[in-house]
Amino acid sequence: MDAIDRKILTHLQADAALSTAEIAERVGLSTTPCWRRIQNLEKSGIIRKRVALLDRAHLNIGIDVFVAVRTNQHNIEWLEKFARAVVDFPEVVEFYRMSGEIDYLMRVVVPDIPAYDRFYKRLIQQANISDVSSSFAMERIKYTTALPLDYV
């Protein structure tokens, strides 16, 4: 990966709908070499997929809830069952197994508190959970899907 590849990735992270010709012009290449580089970035797995980012306010899902889960079950069977259940919840947009005092952390998006309560009730039916703690985001200060490219 060189500086031109990083520039291509920067432009694609900002707007994946850009045409190859537009990207080529912005990075100082002709269309065909730019297209080849993008193809190579896709084949190597650096570009996993291209998606559309939707406006949550227009979809009535403006509330972020960070859900910290603790369990006393630390075995692979429990983890696999819990992970399968959580993956099926469309409200869960991020899901992590953590180190430290919290075992799992989720970011859940919902329209309001009653919707979160319904989600919560479905969640606790799925697995033996010791503790669930929910924090509601008051304000989104920074949100990006763009990854830093300075470490490549």
Image (cartoon, rainbow, N blue to C red):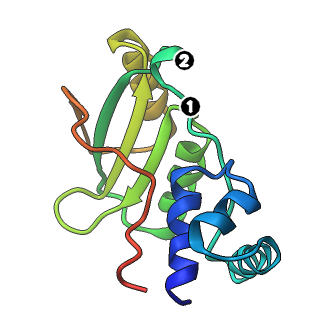
**Please, what secondary structure does the residue beneath circle 2 have?**
helix
Residue toward you, 152 or 70:
152
CB-based contact (under 8 Å), mark 1 and mark 2: yes
Residue 152: which quarter of the image? bottom left
Place of residue 103 in the rendered image (x, y in percent of width and height, measured from the top left)? 29, 58
Q: Residues within 10 Å of mark 2 (few under 14, many from 20)?
A: few
10 versus 122 height, above or below: below
Q: CA distance from mark 1 to mark 2?
A: 8 Å
Place of residue 42 in the rendered image (x, y in percent of width and height, measured from the top left)? 72, 74
Residue 111: which quarter of the image? top left
Q: Which mark is residue 5?
A: none
The quadrant of the image that shows the N terminus is: bottom right
Residue occupying image coordinates x 72% and y 73%: 38
Place of residue 39 in the rendered image (x, y in percent of width and height, measured from the top left)? 78, 76
Place of residue 33 in the rendered image (x, y in percent of width and height, measured from the top left)? 77, 81
Residue toward you, 32 or 110:
32
Q: Amino acid at mark 1?
A: Leu
Asked whether, in this view, residue 47 is left or right of residue 116, the answer is: right
Q: Which residue corresponds to mark 2? A: 59
Residue occupying image coordinates x 21% and y 29%: 139
Q: In this figure, what is the number of numbered marks?
A: 2
145 versus 9 height, above or below: above
Q: Which residue corresponds to mark 1? A: 54
